[in-house]
């Protein structure tokens, strides 16, 4: 992972914590019932998730209280706009952006000497079956300040009010209480500490609950799409809910996505995109065994690329170049069937969100398509970082270098 860290693709752009900030973070963990970290220096993302602490605990989702109730920690205003590396939902990053936008001044004030725990409550104590997700139509975001600073502010203001009444200014006990409050919490009179709950409407989304489920609710009928095959097999036995059920690997799912105008496929356009090039290189890498040259050198040199392509057996070459071969044949005869020539990983991965969808919907469908066919390393990095980091560990060093270069260039040029 060191190469990813150097390229700022793992832990890049996070907020570094140490000293008093690290202590406050541990105090927030205690509020959640989570054991403190032994680390004296670590970094956090927009949700307050730390890759170092996750590695220490051996648990990526250590901030959550079960799948139904995720949490976040705001320890610094610098978290605003930073990446969210391990979201529990597809909307988590947008949710944190909304919180920082609504309460920017309050967050800056509070984090001067305290912190916030953010609780995402969907009014369900725990999930028991995937169909519980159908009840998930809005969430309430509530806030709890470290050391209950807002309550101490109210106590301090009440003391001041009492102090100003009648002859109470000569009350020694009252003097002592005011001084003790000021010493412990500072002057809270003019602090912006009140954060009202935020209620947000939820429509289509992805959740990592039940092994990963997509709920598409903006279309003709609700659709639940499962990553875990065993969870899917149990769900299809249900006869009480009017909802379409699919496993992500079912061919019927792709047909439905196209019929419902959720996704579309235009191979003629797709073959000209960087997306297609990355997929072809990924599949090419999968087919390679031992090579005389580093993989990144092969991919960056068209002569070497052609050399190794021609060293494959005929069937492998046809499989790798299937899209181009199909487009050549379909130009000659419309009787040619795509499934006879184009490998399913190509046809599935080259689908894209339907053009009429809203931006948020497109992002969700890109995530779904990436889950269905995780063969474009850039899309896997963007839409499924957890899987990307797992895949990365098994890649050859040269391919790792090529992927890092590809992602870095894409980020620079916003492909």
Image (tube, helix red, strand yellow):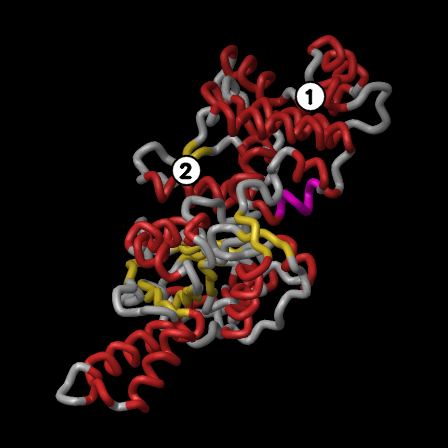
Give the left or right position of residue 345, taking residue 133 as reference.
right
In the rendered image, which quarter contains the N terminus? top right
Q: Which residues are magenta?
A: 387-392
At 65% from the left and 54% from the top, the residue drawn is: 52
> What is the number of the mark on residue 318?
1
Query: Main SS type for the magenta part?
Result: helix
CA–CA distance between discs 2 and 1?
26 Å
Q: Position of residue 50 (x, y in %)?
A: 58, 55
* Residue, disc 2: 263
Instruction: Report helix, strand or loop for mark 1.
Output: helix
Q: Quadrant of residue 159?
A: bottom left
- Out of 153 and 93, give the one closest to the viewer: 153
Is 229 in the magenta? no
Q: Quadrant of residue 221?
A: bottom left
- Confirm whether residue 82 shows in the render: yes
- Confirm whether residue 233 shows in the render: no
Decide which of tag 2 and tag 1 comes sooner along the chain: 2
> What is the number of the mark on residue 306?
none
At 68% from the left and 57% from the top, the residue drawn is: 55
């Amino acid at each position: 992972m060191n190469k990813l860290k150097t390229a700022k693709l793992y832990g890049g752009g996070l907020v570094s914590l140490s000293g008093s900030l690290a202590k406050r973070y541990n105090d927030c963990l205690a509020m959640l019932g989570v054991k403190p970290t032994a680390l004296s220096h670590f970094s956090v993302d927009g949700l307050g998730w730390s890759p170092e602490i996750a590695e220490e605990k051996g648990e990526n989702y250590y901030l959550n209280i079960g799948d139904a109730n995720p949490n976040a920690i705001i320890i610094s205003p610098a978290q605003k706009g930073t990446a969210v590396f391990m979201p529990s939902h597809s909307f988590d990053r947008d949710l944190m952006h909304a919180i920082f936008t609504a309460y920017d001044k309050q967050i800056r004030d509070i984090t001067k000497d305290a912190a916030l725990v953010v609780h995402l409550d969907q009014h369900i104590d725990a999930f028991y079956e995937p169909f519980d997700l159908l009840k998930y139509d809005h969430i309430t975001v509530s806030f709890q300040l470290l050391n209950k600073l807002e309550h101490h502010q109210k106590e301090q203001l009440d003391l001041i009010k009492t102090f100003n009444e009648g002859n109470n200014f000569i009350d020694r006990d009252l003097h002592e209480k005011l001084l003790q409050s000021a010493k412990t919490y500072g002057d809270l009179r003019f602090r912006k500490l009140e954060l009202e709950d935020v209620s947000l409407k939820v429509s289509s989304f992805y959740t990592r609950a039940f092994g990963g489920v997509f709920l598409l609710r903006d279309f003709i009928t609700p659709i639940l799409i499962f990553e875990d095959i065993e969870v899917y097999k149990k769900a299809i036995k249900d006869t009480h809910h009017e909802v379409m059920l699919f496993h992500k690997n079912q061919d019927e799912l792709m047909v439905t996505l196209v019929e419902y105008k959720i996704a579309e496929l235009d191979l003629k356009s797709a073959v000209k995109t960087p997306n297609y090039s990355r997929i072809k290189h990924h599949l090419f890498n999968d087919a390679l065994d031992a090579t005389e040259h580093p993989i990144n050198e092969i991919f960056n040199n068209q002569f070497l690329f052609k050399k190794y392509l021609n060293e494959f057996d005929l069937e492998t070459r046809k499989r790798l170049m299937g899209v181009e071969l199909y487009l050549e044949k379909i130009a000659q005869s419309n009787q040619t069937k795509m499934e006879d020539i184009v490998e399913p990983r190509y046809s599935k991965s080259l689908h894209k969100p339907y053009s009429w969808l809203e931006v948020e919907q497109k992002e969700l469908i890109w995530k779904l398509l990436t889950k269905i066919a995780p063969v474009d390393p850039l899309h896997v990095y963007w839409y499924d970082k957890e899987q990307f980091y797992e895949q990365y560990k098994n890649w050859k060093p040269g391919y790792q270098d090529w992927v890092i270069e590809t992602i870095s260039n894409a980020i620079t040029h916003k492909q």
